Amino acid sequence: MRRSLYLRIVRCVEIQDCYFQQRPDATGKMDVSALRKCTAAVRQLAYGMPADVVDGYVRIGESTAIKSLMRFCAAVIAVFENQYLRTPTEFDVQQLYAMHKKRGLHALELEKLSTAWAGQYKYKEDSPTIVLEAVA
């Protein structure tokens, strides 16, 4: 992920949820920064790391890592749901089909698919196919 994109996500999450804003704790010591909390959450999501392993990389406690993950997911959904997590419109689907057709990916044949599963992937074609929903 590009650094600018990641920092944009961190800023949006920090604005959405005050848990990510850095402030002093009861002893006057500054709390963990939003960047570290978000990094812990993203590493758990991206690499499937347990919360106690994140402690070694980000240097925050297990309970903070778990809470950061939960709050991060809720904040990302709240901020980006309408733009990125919405159901695709008919126009979006047509654009995807056009893009796939242009690249030669409009219907990938599944030659080695089990016959028990083949019926789920047949439409009008004789052989089972699948359409990519996202191309990275």
Image (spheres, rainbow, N blue to C red):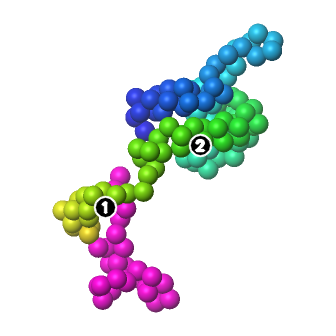
Q: Is residue 17 left or right of residue 134?
A: right
Q: Position of residue 72 (x, y in %)?
A: 60, 38
Callout 2 environment at 10 Å: few (<14), some (14 to 19), or many (20+)? Answer: some
Q: Is residue 111 left or right of residue 18?
A: left
- Residue position for label 1: 90
- Residue position for label 2: 73
Disc 2 residue type?
A: Cys
Callout 1 environment at 10 Å: few (<14), some (14 to 19), or many (20+)? Answer: few
Dot 2 lies on which element? helix
Outermost residue toward the top in this view: 28
Outermost residue toward the right in this view: 27
Above or below, 127 against 7 in this view is: below
Instruction: Using the rendered view, name the quadrant where residue 18 is placed.
Output: top right
In depth, the one of 14 and 61 nearer the eye is: 14
Instruction: Using the rendered view, name the quadrant where residue 97 is placed.
Output: bottom left
Q: Position of residue 44 (x, y in %)?
A: 62, 44
Q: Position of residue 40 (x, y in %)?
A: 62, 36
Dot 1 lies on which element? helix
Q: Nearer the viewer, mark 1 or mark 2?
A: 1
Q: Main secondary structure of the magenta part?
A: loop
Which segment did they paint magenta?
A: 107-136
Above or below, 76 against 87 in this view is: above
Q: Is residue 84 left or right of residue 60?
A: left
In depth, the one of 8 and 95 nearer the eye is: 95
Query: Residue visible at 35% across and 52% down?
Result: 136
